[in-house]
Amino acid sequence: MEKKQLLYEGKAKRVYATDDPGLLVVEYKDDATAFNGLKHDRIAGKGILNNKISAFFFALLAEYGCESHFVKLLSEREMLVKKLEMIPAEVVVRNLVAGSLAKRFGLKEGKPLARPVVELYYKNDALGDPMINEYHLYALGMATPAQVEAFTGEALRINQVLSGFLRERGLLLVDLKLEFGVHNGKVLLGDEISPDTCRFWDAKTGEKLDKDRFRQDLGGVEEAYREIYRRLTGETYDI
């Protein structure tokens, strides 16, 4: 598999073409950003950890029949993925109150929700990723009703699988952000699943083990990402 030209560079990843038009190479960067890029830094080894953690989650979900773009790991920082026609919506599933949900409703962070909440956001950095609903997607031709039903149902199933798995490892899945695309007419999970896109808290202490440590200047970002990797795999990673 030959890695070819750079197609896209985002805040945390680079995407390259390959000699197969149906496959891409995703390279994970060490850059850390928050607040739509207003806050920026580099965290040594973050790209490697996010690549490994995402690959672990994609493989785990495949065991439960949740299909994704993931094909295989290529290196510490790179994975081979199927090319998707991305749906321009971020799908957030919330289990506990945190982040923008706490601000919007004036709720205390950490309050358990009676059932998971699904929220949709238009993926557009220039507009600040505004919240939308399925009717916006239909009206603007971004997704069909069948596609929305497919990815919202899959998001809830992914949340259920990961919540149970993480609970057994002493972690709470507070919320997670997912992205989906279409491959050969089928909706598949894309992007990544990592401490950059999920909130993970220690089940006993409530310690935050995710990107909020960077957002909120809590320190120990590298250590938190390494701890998630250790809890998932039983292995340690030293930068």
Image (cartoon, helix red, strand yellow):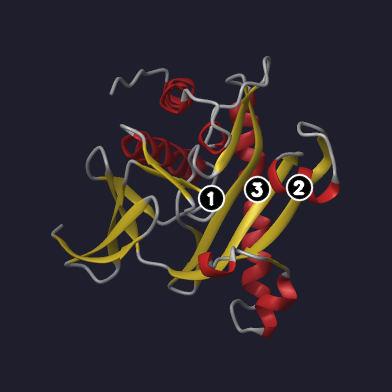
Left or right: residue 147 versus residue 189 is: right
Q: How far is disc 1 from disc 3 in space, using C-alphas?
A: 8 Å
Identify the mark nearer the N-term, 1 or 2: 1
Question: Disc 2 marks which residue?
Answer: 101
Identify the mark nearer the N-term, 2 or 3: 2
Give the answer, above or below, for where 218 lies relative to 126: above
Can you say which quadrant of the picture contains the C terminus?
A: top left
Can you say which quadrant of the picture contains the N terminus?
A: bottom left
Amino acid type, residue under disc 1 in the picture: Cys
Quarter of the image holding residue 47? top left
Q: Mark 1 or mark 2, which is nearer to you?
A: 2
Identify the mark nearer the N-term, 1 or 3: 1
Which label number is shown at residue 66? 1
Quarter of the image holding residue 42? top left
For mark 1, does the 10 Å Cα neighbourhood hold few (<14), some (14 to 19), or many (20 or more) residues? some
Give the answer, above or below, for where 19 lies relative to 80: below
Give the answer, above or below, for where 128 lies relative to 162: below
Q: Nearer the viewer, residue 107 or 38?
A: 38
Q: Position of residue 15 (x, y in %)?
A: 30, 60
Q: How far is disc 2 from disc 3 in space, using C-alphas?
A: 21 Å
Residue located 67% across and 40% down the image: 160
Question: Disc 3 marks which residue?
Answer: 157
Q: Point out the residue furthest to the left here.
A: 2
**Secondary structure beneath label 2:** helix
